Image (tube, rainbow, N blue to C red):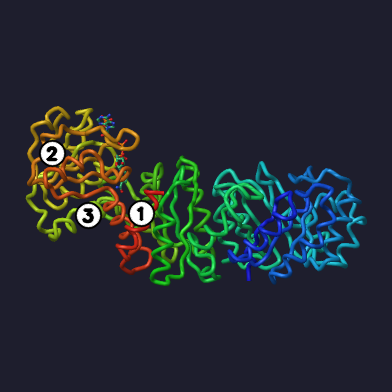
Amino acid sequence: MTLLTVPINVSNPNEAITDIKAAAKAGAQAIELRLDYLPAESYSQTPSLVQAVLKEELIAIATCRANWEGGHFSGNEQERVKLLKMAADAGCQYIDIECKALENDSTIFQPLFKLAKIIVSYHDFHNKPNSLAEICQRIKRHEPDIVKIAYMPTSMNDCFEAFELMRELGPKGIILAMGQVGLPSRILAKKFESFLTFASLESGKESAPGQITIQEIKKIYRWDAINPQTKVYGVIGDPVGHSMSPHIHNGCFGDIKFNGVYLLFQVAGNWDTFSAFFDGINERPWLDFCGFSITIPHKEHALQYVEESSGTLETLAKRIGAVNTLILNNEKISGFNTDYGGALDAVIKTLNISHDELKGLSVAIIGAGGVARALIAGFVDCQCRVTIYNRTVEKAQILADEFNCQAKSLEQANELSADILVNCTSVGMSPNIDAMPVVSNCIKSNMVVFDTIYNPLETKLLKDAIGKQCQCVDGAEMFVYQAARQFKLNTEKDANLALMRDIVIEKLQS
Ligand code: NAP
């Protein structure tokens, strides 16, 4: 069992006791008492803090982190040992001691080894040490019960060594990559049956960078459902911090009780880092990494990776030149593009027609960027008659030549006539919510008006279209349907669309 551990890092002992109770209520299984946050006049409260933890039937871990290791304690080692001994005498089961402190003078800490189980820890808040295995060996020389290493990765590729150590040490290890990049190590601690992972009681009470709250780890990442068999999915991009995908996919995994967890993989925006990440995964099939959503700037890299690995590529994904979904199955890689399919699904579900019935309809696409390209490919594939209107008409012309459709300037959109009008530009997106990609009087009441923008949900374009009784499709629908297609590729099951949409709307409004 991996202990979900809340650090208590406040200076007021009364607040600490309130936080211990709140952590127990939130589902913590262990408490790390950060004694280095206490002012000297409160040291005598240490036993009552330990008692408060034990009263909640939680495991107590005492840490008095020295300031030279990123903590707050500036006293001498005798004082530190005295404080930790007070915690152990009160019944604290685990004591954390820095590897460097033992390397300086282990004898002074020896009495503690007889009183509690010992976590020997190593921290680097700025870098990844050259070799985690070497640090592990240094720690093991002190015969700890638990090895703890926490470091700062610069890229997801810095996390593979952590995963290896987590796998090797199991319940005898705590290996944490910190910061946003390292988040997967905090969640996958449960899969690798590490001794513990940390989660803060609330935002602002983190004891290290990248720690998420206990509510987030339990609700978004379904901590309680993770086990060694859990398959791993995630979104790869740079940046990925604000992605809605973990909320959507984990929520829907939970809905069908699928044994998977969906994470954020921040992979720096170049081909070398992207391909090294996938090489790293391929070398470690035991990671159980199975499926990925791919976002900016890696959609072209994903396509290149599939081609170079002789994987399977969806025909239209190749034509679009972008892969937004990668599936790994028995070391075979397959690439898909669910953006165009999601957009087509959103349209046909709104119109209550089949894909075949799109044939022959006229479609005006406003924009000639990445999203426009995917939608043009999709509509052309359905034999729609597509006209592209773009500010930079040359870009529209290049797309038109490639996909055998028409190109026009944005000004010509004033007189456009089409069955379906799609905005694929960023015009109208928050904060410029009053902007229109086309003039309002080109919207006719018999049109289907589709805005790919989902922030805001109801753009000025859609407001005007609703005013003219048009059938409308918003960007959230497209987002939900493309995610539903990814969900099906990941799980081979249909997604709960209503739940997906509810999650998207909740996230957009938060
Ligand atoms: P992109 O590649 O940067 O293309 C942007 C397009 O917008 C270009 O055609 C550009 O015209 C046009 N544009 C930008 N500013 C303009 C302005 N002031 N006036 C006229 N045209 C302007 O972007 P993208 O990746 O295709 O994304 C486009 C939009 O799609 C995003 O803003 C986002 O809201 C939406 N989106 C939706 C989803 C979803 O699932 N619903 C997913 C991804 C994106 P030029 O060629 O002249 O520069």
* Three-letter amino acid code at the position of disc 1: Val
Amino acid type, label 2: Thr
Q: What residue sits 39% from the left and 60% below the top?
A: 327
- Image quadrant where residue 366 sits: top left
Which dot marks residue 504?
A: 1
Q: Earlier in the sequence, mark 3 or mark 1?
A: 3
Please tell me in which quarter of the rendered image ligand 1 is found: top left
Instruction: Report the residue marked by disc 2.
Output: 387
Look at the numbered disc 1 and give the secondary structure of its residue: helix
Asked whether mark 3 lies closer than 8 Å to ligand 1, one says: no
Q: Do the residues under discs 3 and 1 have CB atoms within 8 angstroms?
A: no
Residue 154: where, in percent of width, then height? 58, 43
What secondary structure is marked by label 3? helix
As drawn, the label of residue 346 is 3
Residue at mark 3 to residue at mark 1: CA–CA distance: 15 Å
Percent x, y of residue 13: 75, 54
Q: Residues within 10 Å of mark 3 (few under 14, many from 20)?
A: many
> In the image, residue 294 lies at what x, y percent?
39, 50
Q: Earlier in the sequence, mark 1 or mark 2?
A: 2
